[in-house]
């Protein structure tokens, strides 16, 4: 069954008199590594687990799969446990099929915690409270991350492994320097800066939301970031859970803040109407043209993958970033994130050993050092990061509140359905009196 679900990248290292390496890779392939030293490690609790096998299934493919392989290699070499990674671009569909068909992997790497929660409710995800103590978790994660791994029934459904920081505004540093613009530290300062840019003949914002069948998610990210900046986290959590309706003063206020920027044609490149037609991956490109066609773009850390080849990133480069500032200072400095959480679906000593390793910053080091990765672990050393990613990590470390992308936590009918289409309808001219009740009506009850 496994072979039908994936192609493998096979990495076998056997220590006899020399190391012998075989590798064969193809797109969306899995990686396998085998180590040889089963002693002297903190993961196996004194057990000799050499030669046992653990299968991890996730959405990492191609280069990401190889980087995950590198991150797992120290564990493999220390324990002798054979760790097989299976990667698929169809992870979300296949993990459900495998779980319901009685062929679950040992560990699943979920990019959407909502799906993990659904499978936990069906009895497919193991509660880690019997494996990891609260003290162990607290040594590895800020309380926000622990809270985000907990089911309503109290179960710890997984351990966080990778994250991306969403609360970022990308900007044109050369223009900022030439015009004497300062990085805003509040929403009000952000609006004042936008007005000054217009007065100076610039267009402040590039906003792009077109994403095929997923058009609308860019807008949901803005709303989520604003919700965290105007309300305490328990209000955000109630909204995610469906206890606070969209058609409420709290959520309506977030849409009204968004409209201050999105519905000002002087602010937005191409005007509000262009938001629906520009592909989201092109959103930062106007910031790096010479001269820039727009000076700011709000998007997550992953937008760098969509920048033109040769783009220099940094304060002395073509584009840099700053933290999306607070609105209500009493809410502190919240950070919106996305990320991957590792969940156990089988209970064996070797699976427990791998899960224990995944709670540590050391488990991410091999990927951190290659770039394109931010670790949620408290013990991930900032010196392991390339300079660009280190800045993301510092924003995350300094956050007063961390919350996961709400639309990824809501039921699919809402989070990847009516919330997306509601954003499209709002930008298209529908009123909040139309949009918000329609989203509420779609919530499964």
Image: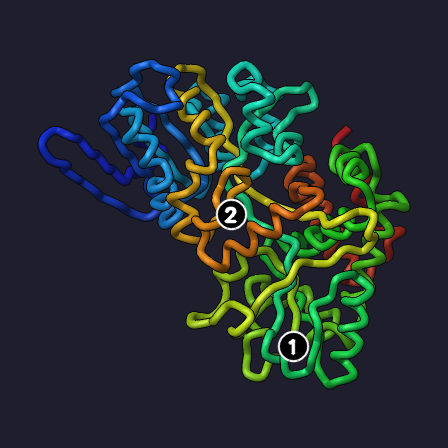
Can the viewer see residue 233? Answer: yes
Spatial CA distance of label 2 from label 1 is 27 Å
From the top left corner, tell me how far across and down residue 168 is, in percent: 64, 58
From the top left corner, tell me how far across and down residue 307 is, in percent: 50, 67
Residue at x-position 77% and y-position 55%: 326
* Mark 1: few/some/many CA within 10 Å (<14, 14-19, 20+): some
Q: Is residue 415 left or right of residue 8?
A: right
Tell me which numbered mark, 2 or 1, is placed earlier along the sequence. Answer: 1
Q: Which mark is residue 353?
A: none
Q: Is residue 81 above or below residue 222?
A: above
Q: Nearer the viewer, residue 259 or 11?
A: 11
Q: Nearer the viewer, residue 415 or 191?
A: 191
State the residue position of label 2.
Answer: 374
* Mark 2: few/some/many CA within 10 Å (<14, 14-19, 20+): many
State the residue position of label 1.
Answer: 176
Can the viewer see residue 442? Answer: no
Q: Is residue 105 above or below residue 196?
A: above
**Which residue sits furthest left?**
17
Residue at x-position 54% and y-position 24%: 136
Give SS at disc 1. Answer: helix
Tally of numbered tags:
2
Q: Is residue 360 above or below residue 207?
A: above
Residue at x-position 55% and y-position 70%: 315
Residue at x-position 51% and y-position 73%: 317
Quarter of the figure with the C terminus: top right
Give SS at disc 2. Answer: loop
Quarter of the figure with the N terminus: top left
How is the protein colored in the picture? Answer: rainbow
From the top left corner, tell me how far across and down residue 334 is, in percent: 71, 47
């Amino acid at each position: 069954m496994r072979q039908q679900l994936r192609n493998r990248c096979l990495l076998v290292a056997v220590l006899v008199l020399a190391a012998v390496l075989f590798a064969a890779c193809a797109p969306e392939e899995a990686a396998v590594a085998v180590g040889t030293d089963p002693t002297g490690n903190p993961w196996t609790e004194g057990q000799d687990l050499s030669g046992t096998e653990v299968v991890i299934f996730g959405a990492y493919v191609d280069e990401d799969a190889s980087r995950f392989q590198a991150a797992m290699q120290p564990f493999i070499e220390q324990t002798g446990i054979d760790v097989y990674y299976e990667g698929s671009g169809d992870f979300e569909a296949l993990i459900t099929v495998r779980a319901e068909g009685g062929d679950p992997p040992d560990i699943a790497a979920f990019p959407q915690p909502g799906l993990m929660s659904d499978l936990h409710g069906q009895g497919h995800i193991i509660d880690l409270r019997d494996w990891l103590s609260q003290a162990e978790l607290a040594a590895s994660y800020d309380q926000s991350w622990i809270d985000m791994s907990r089911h309503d029934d109290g179960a710890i459904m997984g351990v966080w492994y990778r994250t991306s920081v969403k609360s970022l505004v990308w900007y044109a540093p050369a223009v900022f320097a030439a015009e004497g613009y300062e990085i805003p530290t509040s929403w009000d300062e952000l609006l004042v800066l936008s007005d000054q840019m217009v007065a100076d003949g610039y267009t402040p914002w590039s906003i792009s939301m077109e994403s095929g069948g997923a058009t609308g998610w860019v807008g949901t990210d803005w709303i989520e970031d604003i919700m965290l900046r105007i309300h305490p986290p328990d209000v955000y959590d109630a909204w995610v859970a469906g206890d606070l309706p969209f058609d409420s003063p709290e959520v309506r206020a977030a849409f009204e803040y968004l409209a201050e920027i999105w519905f000002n044609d002087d602010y937005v490149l191409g005007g509000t109407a262009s938001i629906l037609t520009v592909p989201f991956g092109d959103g930062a490109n106007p910031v790096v043209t010479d001269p820039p066609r727009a000076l700011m773009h709000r998007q997550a850390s992953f937008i760098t993958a969509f920048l033109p080849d040769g783009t220099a990133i940094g304060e002395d480069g073509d584009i840099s970033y700053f933290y999306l500032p607070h609105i209500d200072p009493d809410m502190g400095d919240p950070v919106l994130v996305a990320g991957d959480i590792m969940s156990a679906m089988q209970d064996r000593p070797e699976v427990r050993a791998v899960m224990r390793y995944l709670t540590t910053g050391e488990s991410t080091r091999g990927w951190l050092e290659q770039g394109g990765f931010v670790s949620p672990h408290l013990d991930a050393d900032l010196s392991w990061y390339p300079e660009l990613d280190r800045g993301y990590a510092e924003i995350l470390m300094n956050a007063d509140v961390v919350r996961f992308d709400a639309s990824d936590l809501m039921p699919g009918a809402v989070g990847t359905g009516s919330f997306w289409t509601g954003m499209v309808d709002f930008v298209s001219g529908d009123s909040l009196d139309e949009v918000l009740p329609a989203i509420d009506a779609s919530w499964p009850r």
